[in-house]
Amino acid sequence: MKTINITVKKVLSFAMVCLTIGLSYADVCMGREFFRYLDIAGPGYLNTDSYDINNNGAIVGAGSDGTTIMSPFIYSAGKYTEVLPFAWEWAAANGINDYGVVAGYGNDGTSTKGFIYNGKTYTEILPPGWMYAIGFKINNNGAVIGWGMDGNRTNKGFIYREGEYVELNPPGWQRADASAINDAGVVVGLGVDSIGRQKGFIYQGGEYSEILPPGWQWAIASGINNKGVVVGYGFDGKALKGFIYNGVAYREVLPSAWTGALAIDINDNGVVAGYGNDGTGSKGFIFNGIAYTKIEPAGWVEVMPQAINNDGVVTGKGIDGAGVAKGFTASPIRKIRTVR
């Protein structure tokens, strides 16, 4: 058996190169060397999920005391704040903008509806005549997107801003959900077309564009940044893969040797966050346009990033080594370099 001796100096130099150029675990680095991790586990919660993070580092999510009750929260500067609308039975906070305004959904005892919380007051979201609505994400102009079911039992997406609703469903499609919105008001989502194929879509200025990488069987658009670059995932007939779409061309997202991957979110610097199966279980990753870096808090058995901010801080959910569902943040130790 061959023995390899590596000096401490060489190891440290190697790690410094890794952190400086942002190479991936598959090329050089493991995520534990690239990120500083923090568990998100609200006080009194048995289970916690983190769903979104803004550019100030504030996180939103939901926790449970082990019953069916979910409580929405904001986590900022080491403090948890519950944001359950008055008299509602349960709720979850899904999105937060850079002004700290939160979007979510829950049940008030009569129906499931969305909400906005601005730090002082709540605004309910339920398009007229709809049976239910899920508030999902909010941009810096206060526009909320989500989905629900109208009075004809058709699943549709929606945009809500200042008391006005826009229903979203590409012409001829059977159903649609909205999944993300940027500050220009461009929305991406997913749905089922007239022949039953699942596709993504872009909605901009009253016009729809379909999202489906060439040759793929189905696709979902899950995120969009302020430069209009879209990410999502789908199936190409062989594997579950992520994609990046810049309005002209598609680029596949799949870490080397992984059996599948989902691209979930993209920040304004073009860094993608997602998760997939590395052959041993569910792991997270970022992709900076050059290489992949694994996201794997020590001992965790499942890791599912949900959002990334412009500083490259990732938040998401997963299961730790003791089987407890928790949220997490993964903060890069060094600035992430990207391809321009």
Image (cartoon, rainbow, N blue to C red):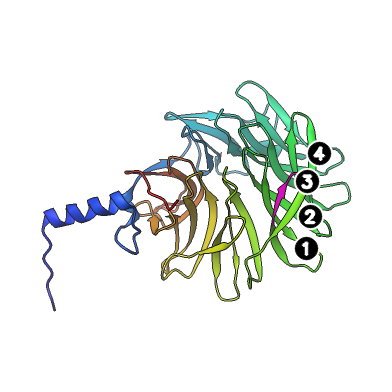
Q: Residue furthest bottom?
A: 1
Instruction: Determine which residue is flagged by label 3.
Output: 206
Viewer-nearest of labels 4 and 1?
1
Q: Tell me the residue at 57%/42% (across/down).
A: 226
Camera-side residue of 97 and 115: 97
Query: Going from the N terminus, do you reach mark 4 or mark 3 first?
Result: 4
The tag on residue 193 is 1
The tag on residue 170 is 2
**Distance from label 1 to label 2 (Cα)?**
8 Å
Q: Tell me the residue at 60%/43% (across/down).
A: 67
Q: Are marks 4 and 3 in contact (CB under 8 Å)?
A: no
Tell me residue 210's x, y (percent). 71, 59
Camera-side residue of 185 and 249: 249
Viewer-nearest of labels 3 and 2?
3
Q: Are marks 1 and 2 in contact (CB under 8 Å)?
A: yes
Quadrant in the picture for residue 103: top right
Mark 3 is on which residue type? Answer: Gly
Q: Tell me the residue at 54%/50% (across/down).
A: 265
Quadrant in the picture for residue 213: bottom right
Disc 4: CA contacts within 10 A as few (<14), some (14-19) or many (>=20): many
Instruction: Determine which residue is flagged by label 4.
Output: 127
